[in-house]
Image: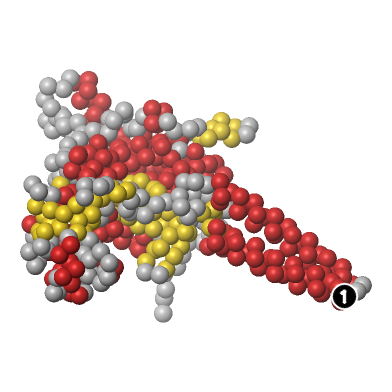
Amino acid sequence: MEYQKGQDREQLSLYTTCLDDMVPRDNSVRLIDQFVNLLDLREMGFQTIATQGRPPYHPGDLLKLFIYGYMNQMRSSRRLEKECARNLEVIWLLKNLKPDHNTIARFRKENPKAIRKVFRQSVALARNFNLIGGQLIAGDSTKLRAQNSKKNNYNKKKVQRHLEYIEHKLEEHQKEMAKADGDQQQELTKQIEGRKEQKKKYQAIQEQLKSDRSSENPQLSTSDPDSRHQIVRGTITEVCYTAQTTVDAKYKFLIDYKLTNQNDKKAMGMMLRRAKSILRHTGFTALYDKGYHTGSEFSIADQLGIKTLVAIPGIGRKSQAPDPRYNAENFGYNKTNDTYTCPQGNILTSNQSHYKARNYTFKQYKTKACKKCPVRHKCTTSKVNGKVIQRTEFTENIQANARRVTESGQLYKKRQALVEHPYGTIKRQWGFDHIITKKGMKVASADLGLMALAYNLTRLINTGIGLKELLQKAIIGTKTLFLVYIKPQNSMRVIWKIKNLITLNFGLKPDYSYF
């Protein structure tokens, strides 16, 4: 049987084509090239990465390399260094430049703010193609593992356990020393010195934790200092970061992201302020899950004039009445008299004292009728005060959200389909379930920013517009990314420049009648 034969590796060949002909005209790498070429990188604040003895690389070339890498599931600086020498698309994109892995890694490390601005330009481009509706958004968070093991994350209790263990071992060594002689004593002396060094290390960590007053339960991560030990799912925990994202409903474009090391409780207000700034109006509806159900955050949303729909969490076991019919939500509130009425018709009043909790103030409502109430055993388990209802300063905001959720019908059910789409692509398909950088949140945010940028550009290509139509009908501005619809009143000089730009970069030859 005859098989197809490959070319002799030692046969000399003369190629009659140039590098540009080896990359198809509709290849997405050309969009990356043009996207970056027409950005004002100096205005965005990109830092030039200097190299010893040679001129520095242009920030645009390194940015192109990272965008291409993230769009093709490559984040490692060493992997990208290899691609510069063997990947035809990368060779075309960088014009045969071959930066080393240290230069590549430093560019990502030193430009987190500038990378965020480039992401904003991808949002502006999508908006100008009418791909962002701005009427319905969904917010959520996901955990991204940090470059810090659980072993190298400490809190006060963990350090105390280590110190107690070391003290116990030192006592054992001292007892063994009394019985040992010769070589055994030398070996035990080494072990004791090692334990003492460990003790100094943990005592230093203990002092750092004591001086940290930013939270009630401070943590210290030694490899990636800003990462925190958090619950990821159920009882599964990781040392990680929390990525907050906002997704527009129309084509599932990411319009915002922020990397934090906190949970979702206090995140909604911050993300809504940012969404208002990005969309430039407050006439949109925002969907969030029950992790964002916090009274103070509802208050912020109401002050901004933004309609929110947040899932209502179940009532905690301690707040449940023995009979659900006597739960607090079934007590009617009279705003005029500032009283509650229980299902039995008794009036609960307040002494008008305001009590302060950790993040809010509240008033208490109770009645003396509880003492003789025939259904008290169904209403409360308290044997002293009877039924006590707490009304916080944010109760009205929480109740307003509950009404909106009830009246919205099927609208809230869209949340998961919207907000999980980017996570499915980024974490499941691309495998970006962890932060590849370390040494702080600012550097980690650059990694997340490149993920979000790559996702948006991929969505832009996959929306069905097509690269040729995308590039023929739009020109990307140099200072801000915006769509320029070509109009007859444009001067011939401008038309000539636009026509040449399209022809030279994308091989298209629009005639003047198009303009």
Residue 434 seen in render? no
- Residue 220 vs 491, above or below: the answer is below
Residue found 27% across the figure and 70% down from its top: 383
Q: Give x and y (percent) for residue 317.
A: 28, 70
> Residue furthest toward the right?
182
Question: Which of the pair 260/427 is nearer the observer?
Answer: 260
Q: Give x and y (percent) for residue 62.
A: 46, 40
Question: Which of the pair 57/400 is nearer the observer?
Answer: 400
Residue found 38% across the figure and 42% down from its top: 20
Residue found 9% across the figure and 67% down from its top: 344
Residue under label 1: 180
Q: In the picture, which quadrant includes the C terminus?
A: top left
> Residue furthest toward the bottom?
1
Amino acid type, residue under disc 1 in the picture: Ala
The image quarter containing residue 43 is: top left
- Relative placement, left or right, of 454 versus 52 is left
